Image (cartoon, rainbow, N blue to C red):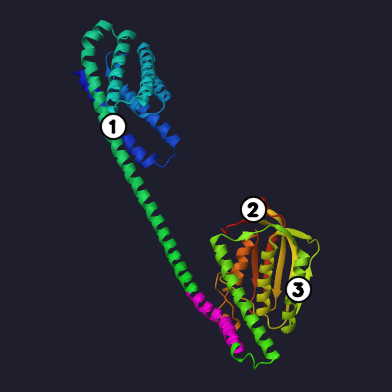
Amino acid sequence: MQFSMMFVINLGMLIAVAYVANVIYKYGLSRTSSRFKYISSVLLVVFGGWISSCFGFNFSETVIFDLRFVPLIIAALVYPRSYTLIIIGVAIGLTRFTFGLNMAAWVGFLNMSILGVLCAGLNYWMRRSTLRLIIKASVTILAVNIVNTINIAFLGVIPWRYYVAEVVPLTLPIGVVLSFLFALILRDFQMEQLRNSQIKQANHLLSKQRNELQKAKVVLEERAKQLMMASQYKSDFMATMSHELRTPLNSIINLAQIINEQGKELDEDELSLYSDLIYASGHDLLQLINDILDLSKVEAGRMEIVNEPVNIRELTQVMMMHFEVTAKDKNIEFSLKVHENIPDEIRSDPKRVQQILRNLLSNAFKFTHEGSVLLEISTQHLDRKGQEGDWVIMAVKDTGIGISELQQHIIFEAFQQANSSINRKYGGTGLGLSISRDFSRLLGGFIRLESEEGKGSTFSLYLPMCPSESKEAGKQPFKLT
């Protein structure tokens, strides 16, 4: 009866320790590091073994009966590292010396050390076995109880005949039953903790998903706005194209009809004038169609870029010759400034570079009523997006109407000009800057804008002196990204 009461008291204390450990983990250790949690749990298991000895049955002045091996059984079922079981067994054995340094204490230490090694082996087996958990737990509980009984019988602190005949028939079954009972109670504790952890993780996941949905909603709303703007841009573009296409076509058709109907009555000067007008209208129409086709190719990723030597001085002279007449007609000063240390050649696509400069210079003359237009060539060493190198800068500076800061971010978009009044006053489709920006990217460069409303603008084309190796292979298609 005394053994039974002692074991029940031991079990109650172990349950209390397990409950306290659960509370400590829930409110004190849940936010600590994994290593600290692991060490703390080992100390709590050792403390459970010491508590069992504190409330054990004093068989004699030195011999104590208790359930100090039960925490070791639970540890064998829980811990993922086998060597931890050896440490726990030795540590619980060392706590026996707190009750006196005698033969029984040494036997208790040796017994728990042996059980620690046994539990380490059982733990190794359980982690590799495919048997059900209940079977592995049953084998572990029975093995530890039986080996504990054998150790006590043969280590000699109690006469083994008396121990086997009188004590074992009572303590072994009670120890096994209480070990199973404590394992079930602890399993309930763990299941509750697991459920709480799962609920916490589910709440965290739901919160994360809610935030992601909110972000996705913002992105979708932004995309919807962009689609609406794109739709508006396309509508504006169609309206603009309707006018831009009809104007030269009507001119060509009307003038051709006049020549057809009144050709015999017209003198040579009138015929020449009409022919020039038809040519100019056809040229404007062809230029408009080319712009649309270029933009479509770039957006489809089918624009071909050719890398070959580009003579900078020859290119600038061509631009000067091309716009000299325009400058004289508008009475605007047009000049070229070439800095020192400009290389004779760079590798790029001469056709696309010329097209970009032509677009930038055309805009400069279009929006400059008086003053000057300057084409300036210089070099600069830049670290662009982590790629350090030398760049050639072709800057077009004018003293024209300028662009407000609020409008500078939209003028590079297709079919856009700074405002609708500009379109009505100056004409054009707004494709030139968009195409120039896309071409500059395909060439490995970029365009920068500096402008102030009423004080002119500076559009700077940056081209790398040494293109990347992927562009050195000659004629290759590049996709705009």
Q: In this view, does 243 lie above or below 204?
A: below
Quadrant housing residue 441: bottom right
Q: Find out whether residue 236 is within the magenta segment.
A: yes
Secondary structure that dominates the magenta span: helix
Looking at this rendering, what residue extends furthest in the right direction?
340
Magenta stretch bounds: 235-259
Please state which amino acid type lies under the numbered disc 2.
Gly
Instruction: Choose the circle earlier in sequence order: 1 or 2.
Output: 1
Task: Please tell me the numbered disc located at residue 320.
Answer: 3
Which x, y percent locates residue 245? 55, 79
- In which quadrant is the N terminus drawn? top left
Quarter where residue 96 is shown: top left
Q: Furthest residue to the bottom?
A: 265
Up-down: is 102 above or below 430? above
Of circles 2 and 3, the one toward us is 3
Q: Would you name the residue on which mark 1 appears?
A: 186
Provide the residue designation for mark 2.
386
The three-letter amino acid code for the residue at tag 3 is: Met
N-term mark: 3 or 1: 1
Give the amino acid type for the residue marked by disc 1 in the picture. Answer: Leu
Residue 81, given in percent of the width and then of the height, sits at 41, 27
Between residues 310 and 217, which one lies in front from this camera angle? 310
Say whether residue 399 is left or right of residue 164.
Answer: right
Left or right, 191 with respect to 33, comes to left
Say which residue appears at 27% left-offset and 31% top-offset.
15
Q: Pointers 2 and 3 in contact (CB under 8 A)? A: no
Q: x and y percent of residue 395 in the render? A: 71, 69
